[in-house]
Amino acid sequence: MTTQDLQLLAHDCGTCPIRHRAVCARCESTELARLEQIKYYRSFQAGQTVVWSGDRMDFVASVVSGIATLTQTMEDGRRQMVGLLLPSDFVGRPGRSSAAYDVTATTDLVMCCFRKKPFEEMMASTPHIAQRLLEMTLDELDAAREWMLLLGRKTAREKIASLLSIIARRDAGLKLRQAKGSLVFDLPLTREEMADYLGLTLETVSRQMSALKRDGVIALEGKRHVIVPDFDRLLEETGDDSDGGYLN
Amino acid sequence: MTTQDLQLLAHDCGTCPIRHRAVCARCESTELARLEQIKYYRSFQAGQTVVWSGDRMDFVASVVSGIATLTQTMEDGRRQMVGLLLPSDFVGRPGRSSAAYDVTATTDLVMCCFRKKPFEEMMASTPHIAQRLLEMTLDELDAAREWMLLLGRKTAREKIASLLSIIARRDAGLKLRQAKGSLVFDLPLTREEMADYLGLTLETVSRQMSALKRDGVIALEGKRHVIVPDFDRLLEETGDDSDGGYLN
DNA sequence: GGTAATCCTTGACCCAGATCAACCGGAAAG
DNA sequence: CTTTCCGGTTGATCTGGGTCAAGGATTACC
């Protein structure tokens, strides 16, 4: 039973980040084993679209590995990323039958899906799930609001620095104040995807990356491998208060 | 009991918008009457701050009447609104003890508050509440994502048109496709607050309002009273797809 | 090998919106 | 009645980031 509990909402908990452990630890109900019966895995290749906005979407899912994005597109082609899904993040909305955003795999991606109908039935009978989902959604809402500040008021340089620090932190699984010293990670996004995240053009992203490199805030090996010699220095560039941290 | 059920999450249902009626209609448990025992009302004057970001906040609340905003402020004073709370909207996060944003009354405001501790206990024992809250939070997340597209990719003119249409629709309690023909409403925000909503300066807001007026998209009586002779025309200016609608 | 495609960088130029500044009109205060 | 204040408008100017365009580096394919 323990094993099955540990698989709540997705996958083997050996690779399960904090968010899911929190569910597991709290969870006592054996009913959760039922999730096992309605789950299935789907794999996507980098660049593949999971669902188009407006399409029927009869499942909810959790990212097991890889990275996916949620984007909105205007009629004339302007694009804005509105969600970045890393492993353990949840996609899909109980109680709605069509996707509201394009969901795209930016790397090879494995998702653990639950057919919506039985998932909703489970939710109704298992209060833990609704509560856990509420917590996750509130976290996402906070992230969205931080993102709104970035889009509305930050300069291009601050936007880039913010994105790098968000990725670095999630990549390292660190809280802000633990993240002293140097840090190394691979960018999971192309320049264009970064631009769609930040509300910029890819040229501006490229220029600002070069500027941060020139100023010694970051170093680059190739185009994707980023070295942050001093994380605090990077944080200064974000424009954020020195205390807060997105990942509560 | 019916009467008390109807007061779920806040206030007398005579003035209760759709969101709350949805709760009431579904709700059968008499336990909800307990909410009555832990609720209290607070009034604020226009301009007054409800809580500052970082302050202790030991309640959650629902707006009864008036309008409140959530804003984030950077160290150097740049401000971005990240939430606009109209009657029936919910503030506060179960499971966190301090406010993450400044909450300010922009008009005279009445809120129905619940002390957090007993509210959380109720949530644990009454699944309906967590589920309803999840729905509301998902709606807010959708609104936030629409807002992100606005902040990241829309022009000043499109931003203004979008804001006007959002306010007009919520004010009229209409869904998009019902909102044909002319529409009249009062702006609940100053030019500066509109600017903070849209990620613009107040001068640009003023200029674009004048431009929309000059082009006959809107008419103004005084500074706040807006007349929209043709709502579809306004919608064309928003840059949004002609079908969607924020209010699901 | 060559060719094409993808992703990225850099330069030159331009423009939407920011900034700075003056001023208007109504309401409140004296 | 005058003064002050606040919210709003409008003009002049500046600039950050967009646009357009050329070219480099890497990988994939023939």
Image (cartoon, coloured by chain):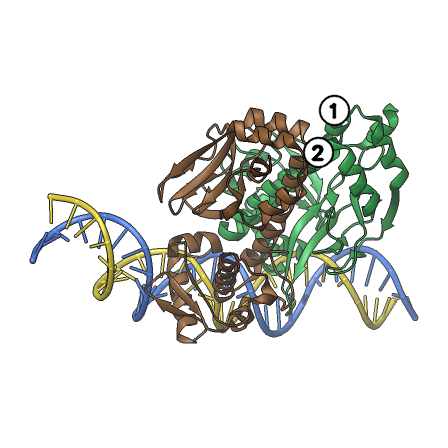
Chain colours: A brown, B green, C blue, D yellow
C2 left or right of B147 in image: left
B229 above or below C4?
Answer: above
B134 left or right of B112 in image: left
B168 above or below A153?
Answer: above
Q: Nearer the viewer, residue B74 or A27?
A: A27
A23 left or right of A85 in image: right
Question: Residues at badges 2 and 1 in contact (C-beta under 8 Å)?
Answer: yes
B135 left or right of B103 in image: left
Asked where in the image residue A235 lies, by quadrant, the reply is: bottom right
**Residue A25 rendering spot, x and y as whole percentages:** 65, 44
Circle nearer the N terminus (2, 1): 1
Residue matched to label 2? B132
Let me know if residue A139 appears in the view.
yes
Q: Chain of mark 1?
A: B
The amino acid pointed to by label 1 is Arg
Query: How far is disc 2 from disc 1 in space, using C-alphas?
Result: 10 Å
Image quarter (top left, top right, bottom left or bottom right) of the N terminus of chain B: top right
**Residue B157 rendering spot, x and y as whole percentages:** 53, 49
Residue matched to label 1? B26
The amino acid pointed to by label 2 is Arg
Let me know if residue B190 appears in the view.
no
